[in-house]
């Protein structure tokens, strides 16, 4: 005859086990409090704690809630914690030892960027490539996308129709006026502008923030109004002006492209004149004589930026 325990004994552990369990819970809470205090005092680095959590998910570090962990970091309160978790795509209920591989990698990059790099490297790795119409910004940007996969090239949203050969999601996100209105209303664009007095163009915010949080270099190819908005929102961004070898060459390139109506060409040349006059606002100037050379110079500026403090980035070709 098997020894069947009464049902109450199956659902409730014996008194002695419950006492032991509650003692263990108190000890675990204390251990987590010690970890938080060590992070707050600077005795332990956040990255080291994250690594300990990954090594032992059931330990004091591993069972620490991600929200408690972030809020014990210097200058991070409840609002910033929510922001960071949103950006890193981590649910607030997660514990440090229970993060997925990609979540852990994103959090680690964020912590290194924010807490471990020397002050001179605490910068937004964001570069804006702007310049007059038809100077070849798009061609230079595409060359960089093809030859430098380490650079994340932002894909803009636009209300204009695709040109032959352009691919939705690669060259632009081609959206309706209503969808663009929604993107603006929901603050989903880092910047946006009506370009050449006709269509609207804007930079989707989320992919940029994700890439920057992961420590990637990001390149935006946008117009001057957009460049100014980025400068206001992220003063650390580097603004590179792509200049034509001459005004005559710019006119030749614009007319030679043959993709715009005469009216559109006239509008674009008028904008280009104003844009050429704005060069002084930029951190650097690159002359687009050949696409490969201009792309190389832009990438060199981005790399210089990753190594040196902002003031040390000098203009090129000016
Ligand atoms: P296109 O119609 O020739 O592709 O581009 C027209 C202009 O819009 C170019 O000067 C380009 O740099 C600019 N542009 C493209 N994407 C954006 C964007 O996201 N924001 C802003 N402000 N300008 C953009």
Image (cartoon, rainbow, N blue to C red):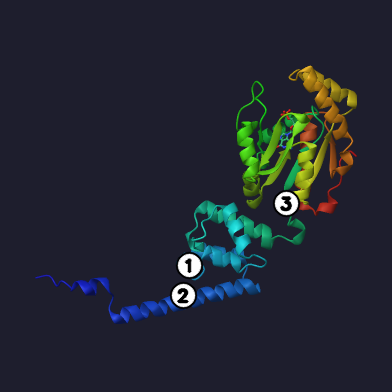
Please give the label number shown on residue 63: 1
Distance in Å between CA atoms under marks 3 and 1 = 32 Å
* Residue name at image x 54 percent, y 75 percent: 33
Residue 43 seen in the current view: no
Given contact means CB atoms under 8 Å apart, are the residues at marks 3 and 1 in contact?
no
Q: Residue 122: which disc?
A: none
Label whose residue precedes the other's in the sequence (1 or 2): 2
Indicate the secondary structure of the residue bearing disc 2.
helix
Tell me the quadrant of the picture where the C terminus can be found.
top right
193 or 88, nearer to the observer: 193
Q: Residue at x 86, y 41 (%)?
A: 316
Q: Ligand 1 lies in which image quarter?
A: top right
Q: Which residue is mark 3?
A: 124
| Residue 242 in sight from this viewpoint | yes
Label 2 crowd bin: few (<14), some (14–19), many (20+), radius 10 Å:
some
Q: Quadrant of residue 84?
A: bottom right
Tell me if label 1 and label 2 are in contact, CB under 8 Å. Answer: yes
Q: Residues within 10 Å of mark 1 (few under 14, many from 20)?
A: many
Q: Which residue is at the front of the view, 123 or 295?
A: 123
Image position, residue 289 (x, y; %): 84, 29
Disc 1 residue: CB within 8 Å of ligand 1: no
């Amino acid at each position: 005859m098997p020894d069947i325990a009464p049902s109450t004994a199956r659902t409730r552990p014996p008194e002695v086990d419950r006492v032991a369990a509650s003692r263990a819970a108190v000890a675990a809470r204390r251990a987590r409090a010690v970890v938080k205090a060590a992070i707050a005092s600077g005795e332990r680095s956040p990255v080291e704690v994250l690594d300990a959590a990954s090594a032992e998910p059931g330990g004091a570090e591993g069972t620490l809630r991600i929200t408690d962990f972030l809020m014990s970091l210097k200058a991070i309160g409840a609002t910033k914690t929510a922001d960071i978790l949103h950006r890193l795509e981590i649910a607030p209920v997660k514990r440090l030892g229970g993060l997925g591989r990609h979540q852990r990698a994103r959090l680690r990059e964020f912590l290194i960027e924010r807490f471990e790099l020397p002050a001179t490297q605490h910068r937004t790795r964001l570069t804006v490539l702007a310049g007059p119409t038809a100077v070849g910004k798009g061609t230079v940007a595409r060359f960089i996308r093809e030859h430098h996969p380490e650079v994340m090239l932002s894909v803009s949203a636009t209300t204009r129709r695709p040109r032959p050969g352009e691919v939705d999601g690669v060259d632009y996100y081609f959206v309706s006026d209503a969808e663009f209105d929604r993107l603006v209303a929901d603050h989903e664009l880092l910047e946006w502008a009506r370009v050449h007095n006709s269509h609207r163009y804007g930079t989707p915010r989320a992919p940029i923030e994700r890439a920057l949080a992961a420590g990637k270099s990001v390149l935006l190819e946008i117009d001057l109004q957009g460049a100014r908005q980025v400068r206001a929102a992220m003063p650390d961004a580097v603004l590179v002006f792509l200049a034509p070898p001459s005004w005559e060459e710019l006119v030749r390139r614009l007319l030679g492209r043959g993709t715009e109506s005469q009216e559109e060409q006239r509008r674009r040349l008028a904008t280009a004149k104003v844009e050429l006059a704005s060069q002084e606002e930029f951190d650097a100037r690159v002359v687009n004589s050949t696409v490969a050379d201009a792309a190389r110079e832009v990438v060199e500026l981005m790399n210089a930026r990753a190594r040196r403090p902002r003031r040390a980035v000098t203009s090129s070709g000016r």
